[in-house]
Amino acid sequence: MGSSQRMRLAWFVNYLVPGWNIPWSGNAGAEWMNGDFYVDMARRLDAAGFDAMMLEDGNYLSDAYGGTFEAELKHTVRGPKNDPLPLLPVLAAATERLGFIATMSSSFYQPFLLARLVTTLDHLTGGRVGWNVVTSSSPLAAQQFGMDALPDHDERYLIAEEFVDVVKKLWRSWDRDAVVMDRATGTYVDHEKVRPIHHHGTYFDVRGPLNALPPLQDLPPIFQAGGSPTGREFAARSADVIVSSAKGIDDMREYRAEVRRRAELNGRNPDDIKILFMISPFLEESDELARRRREERLAITDERAERRLLMMSDEIDFSQFPLDQPFPTDLSTNGSQSLLKQFAQWAGDRPLREAAAGDEFEAFPAFGTPETVADEMEHAFREVGGDGYLIFAGGGGMLTRRYVDQVCEGLVPELRRRGLVWDAPPAGLGLNERLAYDQPAPDQRAAASA
Ligand SMILES: Cc1cc2nc3c(=O)[nH]c(=O)nc-3n(C[C@H](O)[C@H](O)[C@H](O)COP(=O)(O)O)c2cc1C
Protein backbone atom coordinates (compact mmCIF):
# COMPACT_ATOMS: atom_id res chain seq x y z
CA MET A 1 0.00 0.00 0.00
CA GLY A 2 1.19 3.43 -0.87
CA SER A 3 4.34 2.16 -2.51
CA SER A 4 6.04 4.00 -5.27
CA GLN A 5 5.94 2.88 -8.87
CA ARG A 6 9.50 3.85 -9.42
CA MET A 7 12.57 3.49 -7.28
CA ARG A 8 14.21 6.65 -6.09
CA LEU A 9 17.97 6.32 -6.11
CA ALA A 10 20.28 8.40 -3.99
CA TRP A 11 23.94 7.96 -3.13
CA PHE A 12 25.34 8.52 0.35
CA VAL A 13 28.82 9.95 0.28
CA ASN A 14 31.33 11.29 2.81
CA TYR A 15 33.64 14.10 1.77
CA LEU A 16 36.60 12.17 3.09
CA VAL A 17 39.25 9.93 1.63
CA PRO A 18 37.62 7.51 -0.82
CA GLY A 19 39.33 4.19 -1.60
CA TRP A 20 43.02 5.01 -1.80
CA ASN A 21 44.98 1.77 -1.31
CA ILE A 22 42.90 -0.70 -3.29
CA PRO A 23 42.97 -1.57 -7.00
CA TRP A 24 41.40 1.13 -9.23
CA SER A 25 41.75 3.81 -6.58
CA GLY A 26 44.22 5.70 -8.80
CA ASN A 27 45.67 8.74 -7.07
CA ALA A 28 42.49 9.47 -5.09
CA GLY A 29 44.39 9.43 -1.79
CA ALA A 30 46.34 12.54 -2.83
CA GLU A 31 43.64 14.31 -4.83
CA TRP A 32 40.26 13.90 -3.15
CA MET A 33 40.47 17.26 -1.36
CA ASN A 34 40.18 19.29 -4.57
CA GLY A 35 36.73 17.82 -5.15
CA ASP A 36 37.41 16.45 -8.65
CA PHE A 37 36.66 12.90 -7.57
CA TYR A 38 33.23 13.96 -6.31
CA VAL A 39 32.57 16.18 -9.34
CA ASP A 40 33.24 13.19 -11.61
CA MET A 41 31.02 11.07 -9.43
CA ALA A 42 28.16 13.59 -9.43
CA ARG A 43 28.31 13.79 -13.25
CA ARG A 44 28.08 10.03 -13.48
CA LEU A 45 25.14 9.86 -11.07
CA ASP A 46 23.38 12.64 -12.97
CA ALA A 47 23.85 10.91 -16.31
CA ALA A 48 22.67 7.59 -14.87
CA GLY A 49 19.44 9.16 -13.60
CA PHE A 50 20.09 9.19 -9.85
CA ASP A 51 17.74 11.49 -7.97
CA ALA A 52 20.23 12.80 -5.46
CA MET A 53 23.58 12.66 -3.78
CA MET A 54 23.45 12.85 -0.01
CA LEU A 55 26.46 14.44 1.65
CA GLU A 56 27.19 13.06 5.09
CA ASP A 57 28.82 15.25 7.69
CA GLY A 58 30.41 15.08 11.11
CA ASN A 59 32.82 17.36 12.89
CA TYR A 60 35.23 15.57 15.20
CA LEU A 61 37.88 12.89 15.48
CA SER A 62 37.61 10.38 18.27
CA ASP A 63 40.29 9.06 20.58
CA ALA A 64 37.74 7.10 22.60
CA TYR A 65 39.10 3.84 21.23
CA GLY A 66 42.12 3.07 23.38
CA GLY A 67 42.67 6.74 24.24
CA THR A 68 44.42 7.52 20.94
CA PHE A 69 43.57 8.77 17.45
CA GLU A 70 45.51 5.91 15.94
CA ALA A 71 42.65 3.67 14.79
CA GLU A 72 40.57 6.66 13.73
CA LEU A 73 43.21 8.24 11.53
CA LYS A 74 45.09 5.19 10.36
CA HIS A 75 41.89 3.77 8.88
CA THR A 76 40.47 7.22 7.93
CA VAL A 77 37.21 6.39 9.68
CA ARG A 78 35.93 9.93 10.29
CA GLY A 79 38.74 12.00 8.99
CA PRO A 80 40.35 13.75 7.38
CA LYS A 81 36.93 15.04 6.32
CA ASN A 82 36.33 18.35 4.59
CA ASP A 83 33.22 20.44 5.01
CA PRO A 84 30.77 19.24 2.34
CA LEU A 85 28.79 22.49 2.11
CA PRO A 86 31.20 24.45 -0.10
CA LEU A 87 31.48 21.33 -2.28
CA LEU A 88 27.75 21.29 -2.93
CA PRO A 89 27.45 24.21 -5.40
CA VAL A 90 30.59 22.98 -7.15
CA LEU A 91 28.88 19.63 -7.72
CA ALA A 92 25.66 21.33 -8.73
CA ALA A 93 27.43 23.49 -11.31
CA ALA A 94 28.80 20.34 -12.94
CA THR A 95 25.39 18.64 -13.17
CA GLU A 96 21.94 19.40 -14.53
CA ARG A 97 19.31 17.50 -12.62
CA LEU A 98 20.87 15.73 -9.68
CA GLY A 99 19.68 16.80 -6.23
CA PHE A 100 22.04 17.37 -3.30
CA ILE A 101 21.25 16.81 0.34
CA ALA A 102 23.39 18.63 2.85
CA THR A 103 23.78 17.25 6.36
CA MET A 104 23.66 19.87 9.11
CA SER A 105 23.24 19.31 12.81
CA SER A 106 20.46 20.88 14.83
CA SER A 107 22.82 20.79 17.81
CA PHE A 108 25.40 23.15 16.33
CA TYR A 109 23.84 25.32 13.65
CA GLN A 110 21.45 28.10 14.47
CA PRO A 111 18.08 28.06 12.68
CA PHE A 112 18.64 31.47 11.11
CA LEU A 113 22.10 30.59 9.84
CA LEU A 114 20.83 27.34 8.39
CA ALA A 115 17.68 28.78 6.83
CA ARG A 116 19.73 31.43 5.04
CA LEU A 117 22.42 28.98 3.97
CA VAL A 118 19.93 26.51 2.51
CA THR A 119 17.94 29.14 0.66
CA THR A 120 21.18 30.47 -0.84
CA LEU A 121 22.18 26.96 -1.89
CA ASP A 122 18.71 26.39 -3.30
CA HIS A 123 19.09 29.42 -5.56
CA LEU A 124 22.64 28.52 -6.54
CA THR A 125 21.52 25.05 -7.60
CA GLY A 126 18.23 25.82 -9.32
CA GLY A 127 16.15 24.29 -6.52
CA ARG A 128 18.06 21.05 -6.14
CA VAL A 129 18.83 21.12 -2.44
CA GLY A 130 17.61 19.17 0.59
CA TRP A 131 18.64 19.16 4.24
CA ASN A 132 19.52 16.04 6.22
CA VAL A 133 18.64 16.91 9.82
CA VAL A 134 20.93 15.19 12.28
CA THR A 135 21.02 15.81 16.01
CA SER A 136 24.63 14.60 16.50
CA SER A 137 25.42 12.20 19.26
CA SER A 138 28.94 12.63 20.55
CA PRO A 139 30.25 14.68 23.45
CA LEU A 140 33.40 15.05 21.34
CA ALA A 141 31.34 16.96 18.78
CA ALA A 142 29.84 19.11 21.57
CA GLN A 143 33.35 19.94 22.76
CA GLN A 144 34.13 21.59 19.41
CA PHE A 145 31.46 24.15 20.29
CA GLY A 146 32.13 25.03 23.91
CA MET A 147 29.81 22.44 25.44
CA ASP A 148 30.90 19.54 27.64
CA ALA A 149 28.24 17.22 26.33
CA LEU A 150 25.06 17.29 24.30
CA PRO A 151 21.58 17.41 25.84
CA ASP A 152 19.99 14.00 26.42
CA HIS A 153 19.15 11.89 23.42
CA ASP A 154 15.40 12.54 23.50
CA GLU A 155 15.75 16.22 24.24
CA ARG A 156 17.97 16.59 21.19
CA TYR A 157 15.00 15.55 19.10
CA LEU A 158 12.75 18.12 20.79
CA ILE A 159 15.34 20.74 19.94
CA ALA A 160 15.50 19.46 16.37
CA GLU A 161 11.75 19.66 16.00
CA GLU A 162 11.63 23.28 17.12
CA PHE A 163 14.67 23.99 14.95
CA VAL A 164 12.92 22.67 11.84
CA ASP A 165 9.81 24.64 12.73
CA VAL A 166 11.79 27.91 13.00
CA VAL A 167 13.63 27.24 9.73
CA LYS A 168 10.33 26.70 7.93
CA LYS A 169 8.88 29.86 9.44
CA LEU A 170 11.91 31.80 8.20
CA TRP A 171 11.58 30.30 4.73
CA ARG A 172 7.98 31.44 4.73
CA SER A 173 8.65 34.89 6.17
CA TRP A 174 8.57 36.13 2.58
CA ASP A 175 5.54 35.70 0.37
CA ARG A 176 6.43 34.03 -2.87
CA ASP A 177 5.47 37.12 -4.83
CA ALA A 178 7.31 39.59 -2.61
CA VAL A 179 9.79 40.54 -5.33
CA VAL A 180 7.81 42.83 -7.65
CA MET A 181 10.65 44.53 -9.56
CA ASP A 182 8.32 47.36 -10.49
CA ARG A 183 10.35 49.69 -12.68
CA ALA A 184 7.67 52.38 -12.68
CA THR A 185 7.77 52.89 -8.92
CA GLY A 186 11.37 51.76 -8.47
CA THR A 187 10.22 49.07 -6.06
CA TYR A 188 12.22 45.88 -5.91
CA VAL A 189 10.49 44.18 -2.96
CA ASP A 190 6.97 44.82 -1.68
CA HIS A 191 7.79 45.26 2.00
CA GLU A 192 4.29 44.27 3.05
CA LYS A 193 5.01 40.76 1.86
CA VAL A 194 7.93 40.26 4.24
CA ARG A 195 7.26 39.74 7.95
CA PRO A 196 9.17 39.04 11.13
CA ILE A 197 8.38 35.65 12.64
CA HIS A 198 8.74 36.59 16.33
CA HIS A 199 9.46 33.02 17.33
CA HIS A 200 9.78 32.55 21.09
CA GLY A 201 10.05 28.86 21.85
CA THR A 202 11.61 26.57 24.42
CA TYR A 203 15.00 26.54 22.74
CA PHE A 204 15.09 29.35 20.21
CA ASP A 205 14.20 33.00 19.97
CA VAL A 206 14.33 34.30 16.46
CA ARG A 207 12.88 37.58 15.25
CA GLY A 208 13.14 37.15 11.49
CA PRO A 209 12.41 37.81 8.77
CA LEU A 210 14.95 36.07 6.58
CA ASN A 211 17.15 38.69 4.95
CA ALA A 212 17.54 36.51 1.87
CA LEU A 213 15.01 35.44 -0.75
CA PRO A 214 12.89 32.44 0.24
CA PRO A 215 13.95 29.11 -1.29
CA LEU A 216 13.06 28.42 -4.91
CA GLN A 217 11.41 25.21 -3.73
CA ASP A 218 9.28 26.92 -1.07
CA LEU A 219 10.21 24.26 1.47
CA PRO A 220 13.31 22.25 0.45
CA PRO A 221 12.90 18.58 1.41
CA ILE A 222 13.86 17.47 4.89
CA PHE A 223 15.75 14.19 5.17
CA GLN A 224 16.13 12.26 8.42
CA ALA A 225 17.49 8.98 9.73
CA GLY A 226 16.21 8.59 13.25
CA GLY A 227 16.44 4.98 14.32
CA SER A 228 15.31 5.09 17.97
CA PRO A 229 11.60 5.44 18.88
CA THR A 230 12.06 9.19 19.45
CA GLY A 231 14.03 9.45 16.25
CA ARG A 232 11.31 7.66 14.31
CA GLU A 233 8.68 9.91 15.81
CA PHE A 234 10.66 12.99 14.81
CA ALA A 235 11.11 11.61 11.30
CA ALA A 236 7.40 10.79 11.02
CA ARG A 237 6.48 14.32 12.08
CA SER A 238 9.08 16.36 10.25
CA ALA A 239 10.74 14.45 7.42
CA ASP A 240 9.91 14.29 3.73
CA VAL A 241 12.39 11.50 3.15
CA ILE A 242 13.66 8.97 5.67
CA VAL A 243 16.87 7.08 5.12
CA SER A 244 16.68 3.88 7.06
CA SER A 245 19.32 1.63 8.53
CA ALA A 246 16.85 -1.28 8.87
CA LYS A 247 18.41 -4.70 8.38
CA GLY A 248 16.63 -7.50 6.55
CA ILE A 249 13.20 -7.72 4.95
CA ASP A 250 11.30 -8.13 8.22
CA ASP A 251 13.03 -5.19 9.84
CA MET A 252 12.49 -3.05 6.73
CA ARG A 253 8.81 -3.92 6.69
CA GLU A 254 8.42 -3.21 10.39
CA TYR A 255 10.30 0.08 10.10
CA ARG A 256 8.19 1.26 7.21
CA ALA A 257 4.91 0.23 8.83
CA GLU A 258 5.83 1.99 12.03
CA VAL A 259 6.86 5.22 10.37
CA ARG A 260 3.64 5.21 8.33
CA ARG A 261 1.58 4.56 11.46
CA ARG A 262 3.30 7.39 13.30
CA ALA A 263 2.84 9.70 10.32
CA GLU A 264 -0.89 8.99 10.29
CA LEU A 265 -1.17 9.57 14.04
CA ASN A 266 0.43 12.95 13.42
CA GLY A 267 -2.17 13.80 10.80
CA ARG A 268 0.13 13.33 7.84
CA ASN A 269 -0.48 11.35 4.69
CA PRO A 270 2.05 8.49 5.01
CA ASP A 271 2.58 8.55 1.24
CA ASP A 272 4.11 12.00 1.62
CA ILE A 273 7.08 10.45 3.40
CA LYS A 274 9.49 8.59 1.20
CA ILE A 275 11.66 5.84 2.68
CA LEU A 276 15.01 4.85 1.23
CA PHE A 277 16.88 1.76 2.36
CA MET A 278 20.62 1.65 2.38
CA ILE A 279 22.55 -0.96 0.40
CA SER A 280 26.19 -1.44 -0.61
CA PRO A 281 26.16 -3.51 -3.77
CA PHE A 282 29.11 -5.58 -4.97
CA LEU A 283 28.88 -5.91 -8.74
CA GLU A 284 31.00 -8.13 -10.94
CA GLU A 285 30.74 -10.13 -14.15
CA SER A 286 29.61 -13.25 -12.33
CA ASP A 287 27.82 -13.97 -9.07
CA GLU A 288 30.74 -16.08 -7.95
CA LEU A 289 33.30 -13.34 -8.52
CA ALA A 290 31.10 -10.80 -6.71
CA ARG A 291 30.68 -13.15 -3.78
CA ARG A 292 34.46 -13.61 -3.59
CA ARG A 293 35.10 -9.85 -3.79
CA ARG A 294 32.61 -9.24 -1.03
CA GLU A 295 34.17 -11.91 1.13
CA GLU A 296 37.62 -10.42 0.59
CA ARG A 297 36.39 -6.93 1.47
CA LEU A 298 34.43 -8.08 4.48
CA ALA A 299 37.08 -10.42 5.81
CA ILE A 300 37.07 -10.75 9.58
CA THR A 301 40.04 -8.62 10.54
CA ASP A 302 40.95 -6.53 13.55
CA GLU A 303 40.98 -3.47 11.30
CA ARG A 304 37.38 -3.93 10.19
CA ALA A 305 36.31 -4.70 13.74
CA GLU A 306 38.03 -1.55 15.03
CA ARG A 307 36.46 0.61 12.33
CA ARG A 308 33.00 -0.58 13.26
CA LEU A 309 33.49 -0.27 17.01
CA LEU A 310 34.87 3.24 16.60
CA MET A 311 31.63 4.30 14.94
CA MET A 312 29.45 2.94 17.70
CA SER A 313 29.98 5.33 20.58
CA ASP A 314 32.44 7.93 21.77
CA GLU A 315 31.45 7.47 25.38
CA ILE A 316 32.55 3.88 25.66
CA ASP A 317 36.11 2.68 25.05
CA PHE A 318 35.44 -0.47 23.10
CA SER A 319 39.12 -1.39 23.12
CA GLN A 320 38.54 -2.63 26.70
CA PHE A 321 36.42 -5.53 25.40
CA PRO A 322 38.46 -8.49 24.12
CA LEU A 323 37.74 -9.13 20.45
CA ASP A 324 37.44 -12.86 21.03
CA GLN A 325 34.64 -12.46 23.62
CA PRO A 326 30.93 -11.70 23.00
CA PHE A 327 29.68 -8.10 23.02
CA PRO A 328 28.63 -7.00 26.52
CA THR A 329 24.86 -6.68 26.73
CA ASP A 330 24.56 -4.15 29.57
CA LEU A 331 25.85 -1.03 27.80
CA SER A 332 23.89 2.16 27.42
CA THR A 333 24.74 5.45 25.75
CA ASN A 334 23.43 8.95 25.40
CA GLY A 335 24.75 8.77 21.86
CA SER A 336 23.14 6.86 19.07
CA GLN A 337 20.95 4.41 20.95
CA SER A 338 19.55 2.59 17.97
CA LEU A 339 23.02 1.81 16.59
CA LEU A 340 24.08 0.24 19.88
CA LYS A 341 20.89 -1.76 20.24
CA GLN A 342 20.91 -2.89 16.64
CA PHE A 343 24.50 -3.98 16.95
CA ALA A 344 23.90 -5.89 20.18
CA GLN A 345 21.08 -7.81 18.47
CA TRP A 346 23.22 -8.49 15.46
CA ALA A 347 26.24 -9.56 17.52
CA GLY A 348 24.40 -12.09 19.70
CA ASP A 349 26.93 -14.30 21.40
CA ARG A 350 29.45 -14.31 18.56
CA PRO A 351 32.99 -13.12 19.29
CA LEU A 352 33.16 -9.34 19.06
CA ARG A 353 35.73 -9.40 16.23
CA GLU A 354 33.47 -11.46 14.03
CA ALA A 355 30.33 -9.47 14.83
CA ALA A 356 31.96 -6.08 14.37
CA ALA A 357 33.92 -6.94 11.24
CA GLY A 358 30.91 -8.59 9.62
CA ASP A 359 28.54 -5.70 10.23
CA GLU A 360 27.73 -3.41 7.32
CA PHE A 361 25.28 -0.54 7.16
CA GLU A 362 22.98 -2.20 4.67
CA ALA A 363 19.38 -3.37 4.46
CA PHE A 364 20.46 -6.65 2.88
CA PRO A 365 23.64 -8.01 1.32
CA ALA A 366 23.55 -7.27 -2.41
CA PHE A 367 26.19 -8.93 -4.58
CA GLY A 368 26.37 -10.54 -7.99
CA THR A 369 25.92 -9.52 -11.59
CA PRO A 370 23.78 -6.42 -12.24
CA GLU A 371 20.88 -8.79 -13.00
CA THR A 372 21.24 -10.64 -9.70
CA VAL A 373 21.49 -7.44 -7.64
CA ALA A 374 18.57 -5.88 -9.53
CA ASP A 375 16.57 -9.04 -8.71
CA GLU A 376 17.29 -8.56 -4.99
CA MET A 377 16.44 -4.89 -5.08
CA GLU A 378 13.25 -5.50 -7.02
CA HIS A 379 12.25 -8.30 -4.68
CA ALA A 380 12.66 -6.16 -1.54
CA PHE A 381 10.98 -3.18 -3.25
CA ARG A 382 7.91 -5.31 -4.03
CA GLU A 383 7.90 -7.18 -0.71
CA VAL A 384 8.45 -4.24 1.61
CA GLY A 385 7.25 -1.29 -0.40
CA GLY A 386 9.06 1.92 0.23
CA ASP A 387 10.46 4.26 -2.31
CA GLY A 388 13.90 3.11 -3.26
CA TYR A 389 17.49 2.93 -2.17
CA LEU A 390 20.37 4.88 -0.78
CA ILE A 391 23.57 3.47 -2.24
CA PHE A 392 26.61 3.56 -0.01
CA ALA A 393 30.02 2.24 -0.99
CA GLY A 394 30.34 0.88 2.53
CA GLY A 395 32.65 1.80 5.34
CA GLY A 396 36.25 1.04 4.64
CA GLY A 397 37.25 2.95 1.56
CA MET A 398 35.51 0.91 -1.12
CA LEU A 399 34.57 3.96 -3.17
CA THR A 400 36.42 4.23 -6.47
CA ARG A 401 35.50 5.54 -9.91
CA ARG A 402 35.21 1.92 -10.96
CA TYR A 403 32.71 1.24 -8.18
CA VAL A 404 30.62 4.22 -9.26
CA ASP A 405 30.73 2.98 -12.86
CA GLN A 406 29.68 -0.52 -11.86
CA VAL A 407 26.54 0.97 -10.32
CA CYS A 408 25.89 3.63 -12.95
CA GLU A 409 26.78 1.61 -16.05
CA GLY A 410 25.82 -1.85 -14.82
CA LEU A 411 23.14 -1.81 -12.16
CA VAL A 412 21.10 1.27 -13.03
CA PRO A 413 20.62 0.35 -16.71
CA GLU A 414 19.39 -3.06 -15.56
CA LEU A 415 16.87 -1.42 -13.21
CA ARG A 416 15.83 0.90 -16.03
CA ARG A 417 15.34 -2.02 -18.39
CA ARG A 418 12.80 -3.31 -15.87
CA GLY A 419 10.99 0.02 -15.77
CA LEU A 420 11.99 0.61 -12.16
CA VAL A 421 13.92 3.85 -12.60
CA TRP A 422 13.41 6.91 -14.80
CA ASP A 423 13.60 6.65 -18.55
CA ALA A 424 14.38 10.34 -18.53
CA PRO A 425 13.34 12.62 -15.71
CA PRO A 426 11.54 15.76 -16.82
CA ALA A 427 13.91 18.73 -16.91
CA GLY A 428 13.68 21.60 -14.49
CA LEU A 429 12.17 19.77 -11.52
CA GLY A 430 13.14 20.95 -8.06
CA LEU A 431 14.34 18.18 -5.76
CA ASN A 432 11.03 18.20 -3.91
CA GLU A 433 9.03 17.79 -7.10
CA ARG A 434 11.41 15.23 -8.40
CA LEU A 435 11.14 13.05 -5.31
CA ALA A 436 7.37 13.30 -5.33
CA TYR A 437 7.12 12.42 -9.00
CA ASP A 438 6.09 8.90 -9.91
CA GLN A 439 6.53 7.81 -13.46
CA PRO A 440 3.81 5.47 -14.64
CA ALA A 441 4.54 1.77 -14.40
CA PRO A 442 5.68 0.21 -17.70
CA ASP A 443 2.31 -1.41 -18.46
CA GLN A 444 0.52 1.93 -17.90
CA ARG A 445 3.05 3.62 -20.16
CA ALA A 446 2.43 1.07 -22.88
CA ALA A 447 -1.35 1.58 -22.53
CA ALA A 448 -0.97 5.35 -22.65
CA SER A 449 1.08 5.31 -25.82
CA ALA A 450 -1.11 2.69 -27.58
C1 LIG B 1 21.69 6.57 6.15
C2 LIG B 1 22.09 7.35 7.35
C3 LIG B 1 22.78 8.55 7.20
C4 LIG B 1 23.18 9.30 8.32
N1 LIG B 1 23.91 10.44 8.14
C5 LIG B 1 24.43 11.08 9.22
C6 LIG B 1 25.30 12.20 9.07
O1 LIG B 1 25.64 12.60 7.97
N2 LIG B 1 25.77 12.81 10.18
C7 LIG B 1 25.43 12.40 11.44
O2 LIG B 1 25.88 13.01 12.41
N3 LIG B 1 24.59 11.35 11.62
C8 LIG B 1 24.11 10.68 10.55
N4 LIG B 1 23.29 9.58 10.72
C9 LIG B 1 22.88 9.21 12.09
C10 LIG B 1 21.43 9.58 12.32
O3 LIG B 1 21.23 10.97 12.22
C11 LIG B 1 20.94 9.09 13.69
O4 LIG B 1 21.72 9.67 14.70
C12 LIG B 1 21.06 7.61 13.76
O5 LIG B 1 20.27 7.03 12.74
C13 LIG B 1 20.61 7.07 15.12
O6 LIG B 1 19.32 7.45 15.43
P1 LIG B 1 18.85 7.62 16.91
O7 LIG B 1 19.66 8.75 17.48
O8 LIG B 1 17.39 7.94 16.79
O9 LIG B 1 19.14 6.35 17.63
C14 LIG B 1 22.87 8.83 9.62
C15 LIG B 1 22.16 7.63 9.76
C16 LIG B 1 21.79 6.88 8.66
C17 LIG B 1 21.05 5.59 8.86
Image (cartoon, rainbow, N blue to C red):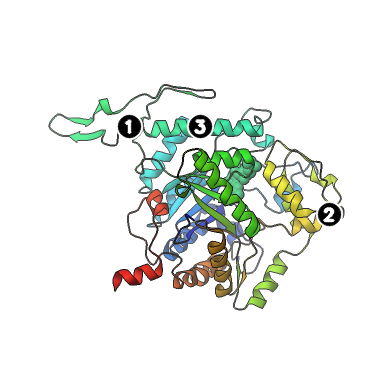
Instruction: Specify the amino acid type for callout 2.
Output: Asp
Measure how far apart labels 1 and 3 are at the Cα level: 18 Å
**Looking at the rendered structure, which numbered label has been put on residue 211?**
none
What amino acid is at disc 3? Phe
Q: Residue at x 71, y 49 (%)?
A: 342
SS under mark 1: loop
Q: Tell me, for residue 163, which label it has, or none.
A: 3
Q: Quadrant of ligand 1?
A: top right
Instruction: Choose mark 1 or mark 2, whichever is in front.
Output: 2
Residue named by callout 2? 349
- Percent position of residue 419, x then y: 43, 69
Circle 1 residue: 174
Residue 170: horizontal and vertical position, in percent?
Answer: 40, 31
- Could you say where residue 85 lies in the image, as x and y percent from the top left? 49, 44
Give the alpha-carbon distance from disc 1 to disc 2, as whole Å. 57 Å
Q: Secondary structure at mark 2?
A: loop
Tag 3 or tag 1, which sits nearer the N-term? 3
Q: SS of the residue at dot 3?
A: helix
- Mark 2 is surrounded, within 10 Å at the Cα level, by few (under 14), some (14 to 19) or many (20 or more) other residues, namely some
Q: Position of residue 93 (x, y in %)?
A: 39, 53
**What residue is at 26 percent from the left and 26 percent from the top?**
191
Question: Mark 2 or mark 3: which comes first in sequence?
Answer: 3
Q: Which amino acid type is shown beneath numbered disc 1?
A: Trp
